[in-house]
Image: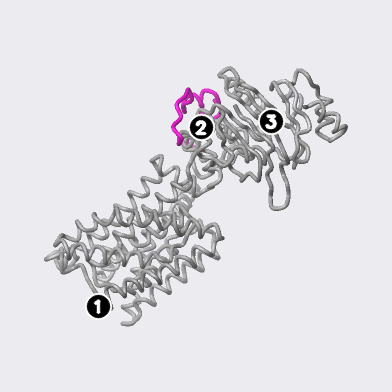
Amino acid sequence: MLSVSNLDVRYGQFRAVQGVSMNIDQGDIVSLIGANGAGKSTLLRAIAGALPIHSGRVSFKQHDVTTTSSSALVKQGLSLVPEGRRLFADMTVEENLLLGTTVKRSGDWSIERIFATFPNLVKRRHAKTGNLSGGEQQATAIGRALMSNPDCLILDEVSLGLSPLVVDQVYASIDSLKDAGTTILLVEQDLERAIRFSHRAICMLEGKIVLDKLTNDTNKEEITHAYFGLQQSKHQEASQ
Amino acid sequence: MMNSLVQAILLGGYYALIACGLAFMFQVMRIINLAHGSLAILSAYLVWEITDALALSPFISVLMILPIMAIIGLLLQRVILERATKGGELLPVLTTFGLAIVIDNLLFQQFGANTRSLSPYLGDLSWESYEVFGLWIGKLPVIVLITAIVIIGGLDLILRFTPLGRQIRATAFDPDTAGLVGIDARKIAGISAAIAMMTVAISGTALGLRGTFDAYAGGPQLLFAFEATIIGGASSLWGVFMGGIILAIAQSIGALIHPQGFLLGGHFMFLIFLFARIYFNRDVFSLKHWLSKRNEKENAA
């Protein structure tokens, strides 16, 4: 479904992502874990076509998309919910959601279904998104991405700045995507939730992947070690 | 006095017409197109050529140059502005300034120093008037004012309620995120430039119908458009419409005070608004702000 090989992304001289390779199959649920500055967002934005790739390859559905623009990727079925929501603050919830239909991909998602999935948005339908709470904004951002009926949904920092209750709601709604066979790649800081929710965990440290395992084969302790870079060499072997 | 006010409002319609394209491009693409006035003169010449060669009514010729100007807008975006914006905020200003000089001089070379006007092709319409309460109101300025209202209203409706309008607003707000939502920012910029140039075509024609133009008439038109945009606030097209009318009223008052005060009055008003915009909260200029304030007072009472 989504394959990344030897990816390098740079900000000037700084190599934010270094030689990253990974393969994600159709229907996989993958958690990307790592400290601030590990290169998670950079990796995801580069995959989604929002950042130029220095070297390496990205392919999506067996097509090379290394230099494809973000808008063309959305059309092919890959949507990113960016970190910090990045809503169009002077537009209403409904307008933000309608923007998701720009690429006109056919599928099950409609405005009504988004409101059924995120009931907290119903009352806010005609409110400017700049005035919403964090949870409502996150729901709108996810809804906007879903409106393009993606085959692969990438969620950067799903639960950042949300109360635990709202995080539960958001996850419950993403859960329904699992059954639909949507491939999901998400960044989650809560390890237990990441292990519980996803099939696979990928841990990044200083721009490199230091752990890539099925969640059934790993545990919180091992991921924590990879997260902080303890026994790094051993885990790299293990991930081969 | 009453007469000058009415004439000023009609003139303001023309200023609004020429300013709306400049404001639209600034809103959507964050570009101040200094070739705006010269492009308006270019379209006036195109209309004049077609009208003269084919013996058509200027109102039909302008329909014919709309697609031409739309294509010029698209090319302007693809060939010049797209590259210029990559070089920072100042570069598009310098580039369009250069483009204005090139257009002006090419027009001068082609058409010479003679002034031209489209009004001879209008027949009686160029001087026909309505008599309202003892005031004579020219039919043509009324047509221009109505055109301005229709175009600004139409653009406003497109921006608010159509998918294209939403995409344009989203691209203006945050081009990176617009891409992540699936909006092709390049396509949107091209369409916006084409729309802006179509308004330029109409305003250039309006100038030619109302009076005369020559190859170097672009500069003053740009100045009027710019002043109307700043007075009205670049964020709303209806604001720009009001800006055009305020500018024209200020010019008329200037002309009443002193025979040569026409332009000075406009500049003075422009400066007042410019400094007021810098020093005061932007809410002060919004009608909504004052209406809600009044409501609050009434509620309190």
Name the residue furthest bottom.
B259
* Residue ID for mark 2: A76
Q: Distance between the residues labelled 1 and 3?
A: 70 Å
Chain letter behind tag 2: A
- Which marked residue is nearer to the observer: mark 1 or mark 3? 3
Magenta span includes A105: yes
**Magenta stretch bounds:** A102-126
In the picture of the structure, the residue carrying the numbered disc 3 is: A22
The three-letter amino acid code for the residue at tag 3 is Met
Residue B70 lies, in percent from the top left, at: 34, 54
The CA span between labels 3 and 2 is 20 Å
Residue B210's quadrant in the figure?
A: bottom left
Q: Nearer the viewer, mark 1 or mark 2?
A: 2
Name the spot of residue B82 as percent of width and height, x first.
Answer: 48, 55
Give the mark count: 3
Q: Mark 1 lies on which chain?
A: B
In front: label 3 or label 2: 3
Which residue is outermost to the right?
A231
Q: What element carries label 2?
A: helix
Please tell me which residue lies in front, A152 or A168.
Answer: A152
Identify residue for label 1. B114
| Residue found 12% across the figure and 66% down from its top | B123
First in residue order: circle 3 vs circle 2: 3
Secondary-structure class at tag 3: strand
Residue under disc 3 on the same chain as residue under disc 2: yes
Where residue B98 appears, as percent x and y from the top left, is 45, 69
Establish if B155 lies above or below A59: below
Residue B59 percent coordinates (x, y): 20, 58
